[in-house]
């Protein structure tokens, strides 16, 4: 995501932050019930394998900023490619789906096994744009996302990025990219193949 990168154990770690809908005013019993209800609304994980054909596992975690949904694409301690889903219950389902596919794209394009580009530098921003593009096209082509679902994704993104403190220009350019990708009939696979070719990586 634009501007949000954490580095852990020397791996590329890319995070998409999401807004939260917090029931902070409810009592503890009520909050637990809310959480339980929302947990059943978690989006099913997408099919995902990396550019080497290794299957990517998804796992839930409550680590990270409470109430803020985010994703992270890394190799775990044993070297397996994983996507971590932080606080997903706090995000709208459409945005959960977007985060999953954005993080999967970092595996599909080989980002996770490449050196971490400087934060907010051109290479970093391009990687984020590519992952956004792959994600929204998969949602369009595989999940049947219409304009309404698209708007849910971008509205959540706008709210969350503003909450985190991104300038309007960053938010606008990110959403413009996602919108252009959504309208362009090319597929996610087309873009992934092009990126792998540019990087000299084998195309599956
Ligand atoms: Zn990312």
Image: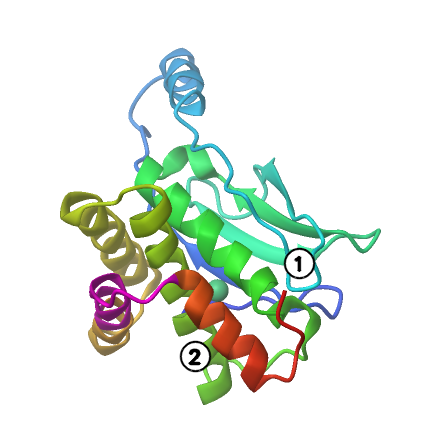
> Is residue 144 on the magenta stretch?
no
**Does dot 1 land on a helix, a strand or a loop?**
strand
Which residue is the site of mark 1?
Answer: 74
Q: Could you classify mark 1 by the number of other residues whose Cα lies within 10 Å: few (under 14), some (14-19), or many (20 or more)?
A: many
Where residue 18 appears, as percent x and y from the top left, is 37, 50
> Is residue 182 on the magenta stretch?
yes
**Does dot 2 land on a helix, a strand or a loop?**
helix
Residue 28 vs residue 19: left or right?
right
Q: Is mark 2 within 8 Å of ligand 1?
A: no
Of residues 63 and 44, which is closer to you in this image?
Answer: 44
What is the magenta range? 176-187
Q: Looking at the image, which residue is at 34% across and 41% down? A: 143
Q: Looking at the image, which residue is at 45% across and 38% down? A: 88
In this orientation, does residue 76 appear?
yes
In this rendering, the answer to whether 160 lies above or below 133 is above
Question: Where's the N terminus, which quadrant?
Answer: bottom left
Residue 157 vs residue 39: left or right?
left
Residue 51 vs residue 45: left or right?
right
In this rendering, the answer to whether 165 lies above or below 49 is below
Of residues 130 and 156, which is closer to you in this image?
Answer: 130
Where residue 93 appears, as percent x and y from the top left, is 34, 36
The disc, 2 or 1, on the residue closer to the chain's N-terminal end is 1
Residue 157 sits in quarter: bottom left
Structure colour scheme: rainbow
Residue at the far front: name it: 204
Q: Looking at the image, which residue is at 36% across and 65% down? A: 133
Where residue 128 appears, as percent x and y from the top left, is 44, 71
Which residue is the site of mark 2?
Answer: 125
């Amino acid at each position: 995501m634009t501007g949000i990168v954490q580095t852990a154990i020397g791996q590329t770690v890319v995070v998409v932050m999401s807004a939260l809908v917090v029931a902070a005013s409810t009592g503890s019993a009520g909050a637990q019930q809310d959480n339980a209800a929302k947990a059943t609304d978690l989006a099913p994980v997408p099919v995902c394998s990396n550019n080497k054909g290794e299957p990517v596992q998804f796992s839930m975690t409550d680590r990270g900023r409470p109430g803020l949904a985010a994703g992270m694409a890394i190799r775990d301690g044993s070297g397996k490619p994983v996507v971590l889903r932080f606080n997903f219950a706090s995000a709208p389902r459409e945005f959960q789906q977007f985060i999953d596919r954005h993080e999967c794209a970092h595996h599909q394009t080989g980002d996770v096994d490449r050196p971490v580009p400087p934060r907010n530098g051109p290479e970093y921003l391009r990687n984020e744009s590519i992952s956004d593009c792959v994600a929204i096209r998969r949602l369009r082509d595989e999940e049947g996302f219409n304009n309404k679902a698209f708007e849910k994704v971008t509205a959540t993104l706008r709210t969350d990025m503003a909450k985190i403190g991104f300038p309007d220009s960053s938010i606008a350019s990110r959403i413009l990219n996602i919108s252009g990708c959504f309208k362009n009939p090319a597929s996610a696979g087309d873009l992934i193949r092009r990126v792998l070719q540019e990087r000299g990586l084998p195309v599956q």
